[in-house]
Amino acid sequence: MSLARLTEDLSADDLTALEAAITALVAGTSEVVMTSGRFSWIAFRPITTGSNQHDTGAQGDSR
C-alpha cells in the first residue's frame, strides 16, 4: 500500500498516532524493533466495551 493511499484511508486521529509512532521510532524511544533494516507496522483497533459505540473494524484491521 502506498503512503498516499494509507494517509487517505486513515482518520485524522489515526494519522496523528501513526506520526507519533514514527517520531518515537526515529528518536529511538519506540517499542518498535528494527531488524536487518526491515520493519513491519501492525495496528490493532481496541475493542470498545461497556458503551454504545460499535467497533467498525475487524480485529486486526489496520484501516
Image (spheres, rainbow, N blue to C red):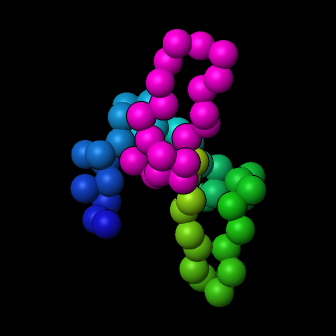
Q: In percent of the image, x 60 and y 34: which residue is there? A: 47
Residue 26 percent coordinates (x, y):
61, 58
- In the foreground, 34 or 23: 34
Q: Is residue 55 magenta?
A: yes
For the view shown, which residue lies furthest in the bottom direction?
A: 36
Residue 2 appears anywhere in the view: yes
How many discs mark residues in the rendered view?
0
Residue 43 percent coordinates (x, y):
55, 52
Task: Classify residue 44 as left or right of residue 62.
Answer: right
Q: Is residue 50 magenta?
A: yes
The quarter of the image holding the N terminus is: bottom left
Q: In percent of the image, x 54 and y 62: which residue is there? A: 41
State whether the magenta stretch is mostly helix, strand or loop: loop
Residue 1's place in the image compared with 5, above or below, is below
Residue 56's place in the image compared with 18, above or below, is above
Residue 20 percent coordinates (x, y):
56, 42
Residue 19 appears anywhere in the view: no
Task: Classify residue 7 as left or right of residue 57.
Answer: left
For the view shown, which residue lies furthest in the top direction?
A: 52
Q: In percent of the image, x 32 and y 54: which residue is there? A: 6
- In the foreground, 14 or 29: 14
- In the foreground, 47 or 12: 47
Task: Classify residue 51 as left or right of residue 55.
Answer: right
Magenta segment boundaries in residue numbering: 45-63
